[in-house]
Image (cartoon, rainbow, N blue to C red):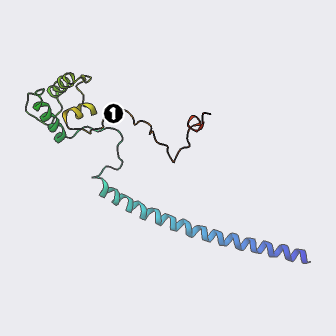
Amino acid sequence: MRINLQKATHLASSLLLAAGLGVFAGSLQAKSARGKAARSTAHSSAHKRKSSRPTRRERGQQAPTPERITEIQQALAKGGSYTGTPSGKWDESTEEAMRKFQESHGLNPTGKLDARSLQQLGLGSQIAGVAAPRPSATASKLTPPSTQAVQRHP
């Protein structure tokens, strides 16, 4: 009789557990549905606030601003390559002026804006377009010395 009592107790506790989980799961689903609705509302209002800003940063080089183009046109005019009035628009006359400037300074005359051309115009970085850094002549603490440097000649 003891075995039957043990089975009955086990069965009863299993049923109670299942019933409790069923009630608990139902309340979780209700809470989840309310949470999703709240998040959806919050997300849409936050999205409306952010719509004036770009959501993702674009990779790669971006087109220069009209102010920057005007600055480039002024620099080209100063050197005599550009004869028009700076307009802030990259048009055919600006491209032709850039091509003339590049050719007169020993650059590849593409007419397109690049780092070396900006550097020659005095508008770019002083290290733009320079070769990759050379390895240091001094020993580095981060990398082990090469086997050739470690070998000693008798």
Is residue 114 in sight in this rendering?
Answer: no
Name the residue: 30% across, 36% down: 128
Tell me the element at label 1.
Answer: loop
Q: Position of residue 69 (x, y in %)?
A: 18, 37
Asked if residue 127 lies left or right of residue 154, the reply is left
Q: Position of residue 72 (x, y in %)?
A: 17, 35
Asked if residue 115 lies left or right of residue 121, the reply is right
- 29 above or below 80? below
Query: Label 1 is placed on what type of residue?
Result: Val
User: For mark 1, does the 10 Å Cα neighbourhood hold few (<14), some (14 to 19), or many (20 or more) residues?
Assistant: few
Determine the residue located farthest toward the front in the rendered image.
154
Total marks shown come to: 1
Q: In terms of image quadrants, where is residue 37? A: bottom left
Determine the residue located farthest toward the right in the rendered image.
1
Location of the C terminus by quadrant is top right
- 114 above or below 40? above
- 42 above or below 75? below
Q: Which residue is mark 1?
A: 130
Q: Position of residue 61 (x, y in %)?
A: 31, 38
Asked if residue 30 lies left or right of residue 83, the reply is right
Name the residue: 57% across, 34% down: 148
Q: In terms of image quadrants, where is residue 125? A: top left
Residue closer to the observer: 130 or 58: 130
Is residue 44 in sight in this rendering?
Answer: yes
Location of the N terminus by quadrant is bottom right
Q: Position of residue 73 (x, y in %)?
A: 14, 33
Q: In terms of image quadrants, where is residue 65? A: top left
Name the residue: 20% across, 23% down: 99
